[in-house]
Amino acid sequence: MTTIHVPTPQEITGPAQAGKTENMVLNMGPHHPSTHGVLRLVLELDGEQVVNVAPDIGFLHTGIEKNMEAKTYQQAVVMTDRMDYLAPLSNNLCYALAVEKLLDVEIPERVQIARVLLVELQRISSHLVWLGTHALDLAAMTVFLYTFREREQILDIFELVSGARMMTSYIRIGGLAYDLPSEFLPTVGAFLDIMPGRIDEYEDLLTANPLWLERTVDVGVIDEASALALGLTGANLRATGCAYDVRKAMPYSGYETYDFAVPVGKKGDTYDRYRVRVAEMRESVKIARQAWERLREIGPGPYATADRKVAPPPKSEITHSMESLIHHFKLWTEGFKPPRGDAYVSIESPRGVLGCYVVSDGGPKPWRVHFRSPSFVNLQSLPHMAKGSMVADLVALTASLDPLLGDVDR
């Protein structure tokens, strides 16, 4: 296996060796508009050329994983929203699937379809933020305004189903928080109708733009072997030509029944990472359209498991069923108690492989929760990709990795 050394800030800022020209050491961040969060990059520079770079993380540490140990399994859902705060529904889904694996609970087909539709809309929303801010980092203002126009429509859909635009906590253990409203399918259908044309607009502005090509082609190149050695996943790995996608390799929530392709690049540069994510948005529209049609065919139905010891009964039941009222009371005061054991589930989040490991001691609260967050792992490739580049290219390179510091500093 290829071994790649990632330098620490201490290695870069150590004393200069005698008889050698001393390079300049600069801080980029932790407050810098192009680091996509509170990230400090310690740069070793020879003029404007990057000799070495060391990511310094931890400025946004929230202790989410530890705090989840003090919450019941259902209460902990709200904390998952705040890790990758551009893909909270993906975080909800990963955690819910892990706990459902512990409980061995059956999820209705309608819920599975709704989950797929929502997380694919979330993937599009996340990629829109990435594309807009990435373009803005390279002085392309118009793209930012266009992408946020469509993102607003997706956030309106999330608000429609959950009452919140971003921190939805809508995907719950056992199903969904509430049933889908009657306006859901028409609203989503209208969005899916216009979105392919909007993606065409982004490509018209960027894909063949000579300035965009100059700033992204052959910038931050990484080959497939190095990407695998560094643990890269998601679009960053697929841009090297490796067609690994959890939705295909280890399907969950019925993804094996959907027709979609896995876009890949060739050179593994910043431009390829751009092309792969744009193509992924098109594939997400395709998946969302299939899920939308299935929801329309399946019609009304349950929005959570029928196991009342896992998911609370609908409010309509509580008004006339004492048993339902007791289930509701016990779930929200004591919580459910999965059997002793552990479970791990991974999904394909907008940034790559997101994994959740849950350990149960038989009590109402998780004994341990740990997330394998893609941003944390992807970020370690930055020193390898940045060596020899210019400082100006480092801005484009960092943005192309799509790091999110809430996803890094859990």
Image (cartoon, grey):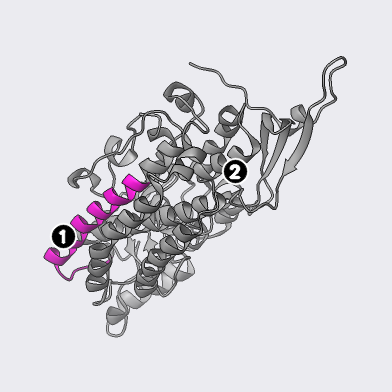
Q: Is residue 360 above or below residue 293?
A: above
**Residue at coordinates 22% horizontally, 44% vertically from top-left?**
260
Q: Is residue 133 left or right of residue 352?
A: right
- Range covered by the magenta-colored residues: 278-303
Residue 101, percent from left and from top: 35, 47
Q: Amino acid at mark 2?
A: Val
Q: Residue furthest bottom?
A: 319
Q: Is residue 116 left or right of residue 59?
A: left
Q: Quadrant of residue 326?
A: bottom left
**Residue that numbered label 2 is attached to:** 395
Mark 1 or 2 closer to N-term?
Answer: 1
Residue 286 drawn in magenta: yes
Q: Count of labels shown? A: 2
- The disc placed on residue 294 is 1
Q: CA separation, marks 1 and 2?
A: 42 Å
- The disc placed on residue 350 is none
